[in-house]
Image (cartoon, rainbow, N blue to C red):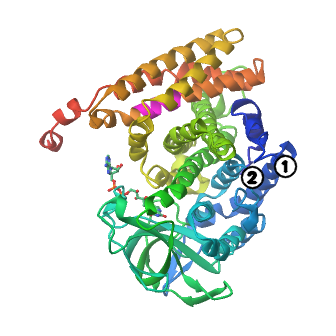
Amino acid sequence: MPFRAPVPEYKFMFDHVVDLGQVTQTERFAEADQDVVDAILTEAGRMCEEVMYPVQRNGDLEGAVLENGKVRTSPGFADAYRQIAEGGWISTSADPEYGGMGLPHSVTTVVNEMMSASCLSLQLNPLMTQGQIEALEHHASDEIKATYLPKLISGEWAGTMNLTEPQAGSDVGALRSKAEPNGDGSYAISGQKIYISWGDNDITENVCHLVLARLPDGVPGTKGISLFIVPKLIPDENGNPGVANSLKVVSLEHKMGLHGSPTAVMQYDGATGWLIGEPHDGMRAMFTMMNNARLGVGGQGVGVAEGAYQHALAYAQERKQGRTPVEGGSGTIIDHADVRRMLATMKADVFAARAIELACAVAIDMTTATKDPEWKARAAFLTPIAKAFGTDTGIAVSEMGVQVHGGMGFIEETGAAQYSRDVRVTAIYEGTNGIQAMDLVGRKLMDGGEAAYRLLDEIEANAEAARGTFPELAEPVWEATETLRETTEWLVAQGDMNDRFAGCVPFLKGFARVLGAHYHLRAAMGEGGAGARTKLARFYITRLLPEHAGLLAHAMRGAEDLYAITVDDLAV
Ligand SMILES: Cc1cc2nc3c(=O)[nH]c(=O)nc-3n(C[C@H](O)[C@H](O)[C@H](O)COP(=O)(O)OP(=O)(O)OC[C@H]3O[C@@H](n4cnc5c(N)ncnc54)[C@H](O)[C@@H]3O)c2cc1C
């Protein structure tokens, strides 16, 4: 079945749900008027449908392999990548001074989401490069920028991020890779990095690695880490790829999905690298890349959910089974109440997760355009929610997509299982969803909950405004927001961080449930009638929103009862 890029949906959401207008009215993004945004979305959507989606199965069936120390990518990936690069889709938000389009991050977020929906394992390559571009734009010297940015932005070179080591996963501060000054401004980087996405490829003429390592005087922990750019081929004096650097791909991982993305173990043996940002300040520079990537990974979840939903919807309209319970029904399984429930749940949750993702992107753009600390706090607060809820939704929706297919969902030929396998890792990489939730109740509540309360105030004001038209929808949203406010207050009051962490995942999910209801209500208001969006909002608010109560009660349990269950008890 074909993939259809949901371009009209994005346009509606920009206009009526997340208000892209406030971004495009700023001086910084004035050139991104409606015509420009519409043209970009339409053209990117066409590329995803016609170029990327056709290679998605290849990536699963004939994944990347390592042959004689070189990575060979899946059939068709090289050509599809070239078309992505030529279309400018790697660098829609990059600095025009170096060849980027300078468009709002909201637009890039949508382009990335469509690319994820059409071929996740190939999309991961540009996503990594985008993060590297942003890190260099903010933290690199002018010389490094001039050498690397034009090539990364054009897609001639690709970028990777190298944090993880065998003993340093979630705890990045435990890394052991070393950087020794060479005395000429460069550094010798040594160490092993694992799980490096797109660690090498046979498509781009160079691969540039952003590597975290410790200088000789770097203290233990995250404060002693520095960031380096380490190219596979060292640029010559003209900026062209020159001699090979002292680094190699040791092996590629065998994974449950995402086979088209080469996930590499990388070995650096005194490889030449250049410092990005200040010594020992690598985590700050890396965070630029990671925040961008966290929202991008949330968008991967939403994109895969969209693809899985389209697949399931098409199957449900073809598969005949049982007697239809509705008069005038088609006789296919879409007539059955439980199948209808699954499809409505998938569609409603894709909308909710997408709205959170786009609201986060709009907050990032408003921060860029206005430098307003309140927008900055909003973006920071929404990022872990967008990452974790987007990817949890990708997993839940694609899993439900398998269920809609019945036995055929378990049979690989339908492609339903691929979505489920491919998207599973998105809840793990870029900081596990548990780590995201800890960030939400930890760092993101360090302001005493101010950013959270401002968001809750807006949700309540919107619900108040909706009371006249949709009283039966506005009231539950308002009430849920009050419960969420009380839970947030409880968390802020806990001095022992472990009491917050014990409930952080249900808190994040509960917060996302309430946000989802808010955006559904806005969609109903934007539609202004009893159409499909209003019906979907009613479904979400009456059937899915109530989950928030159980989740938020869970969030306030504290840690004591968890530790009352001892390790021995768990072993019984
Ligand atoms: C396919 C794939 C691609 C990847 N791509 C990249 C890449 O390009 N670059 C890169 O650098 N890395 C990459 N990674 C690595 C990825 O980011 C890590 O796997 C991830 O951060 C988790 O680290 P870990 O695997 O060591 O798990 P661990 O850190 O061992 O975590 C195991 C479990 O313990 C939990 N946990 C750990 N610490 C805590 C804590 N303090 N509090 C509460 N719970 C905790 C985690 O949430 C998790 O559930 C990739 C991984 C995969 C599988």
The residue labelled by disc 2 is 103
Image location (x, y in percent) of residue 349: 58, 34
Magenta span? 507-514
Residue type beneath disc 2: Leu
Residue at point 34%, 66% (across, down): 175
Residue type beneath disc 1: Val
In which quadrant of the rendered view does residue 568 lie? top left
Q: Foreground: 74 or 556?
A: 556
Residue at point 39%, 44% (across, down): 434
- Please report contact status of discs 1 and 2: CB closer than 8 Å, yes or no: yes
Q: Nearer the viewer, mark 1 or mark 2?
A: 2
Q: What secondary structure prevails in the magenta region?
A: helix
Q: Earlier in the sequence, mark 1 or mark 2?
A: 1
Q: Marks 1 and 2, Cα distance to the nearest angstrom?
A: 9 Å
Vertical position of residue 111 compared to residue 550: above or below: below
Residue at point 35%, 64% (across, down): 224
The residue labelled by disc 1 is 36
Classify 10 Å Cα crowding around label 2: few (below 14), some (14-19), many (20 and above). many
Q: Foreground: 149 or 3?
A: 149
Q: Which secondary structure, mark 1?
A: helix
Q: Which secondary structure, mark 2?
A: loop
Q: Quadrant of the C terminus?
A: top left
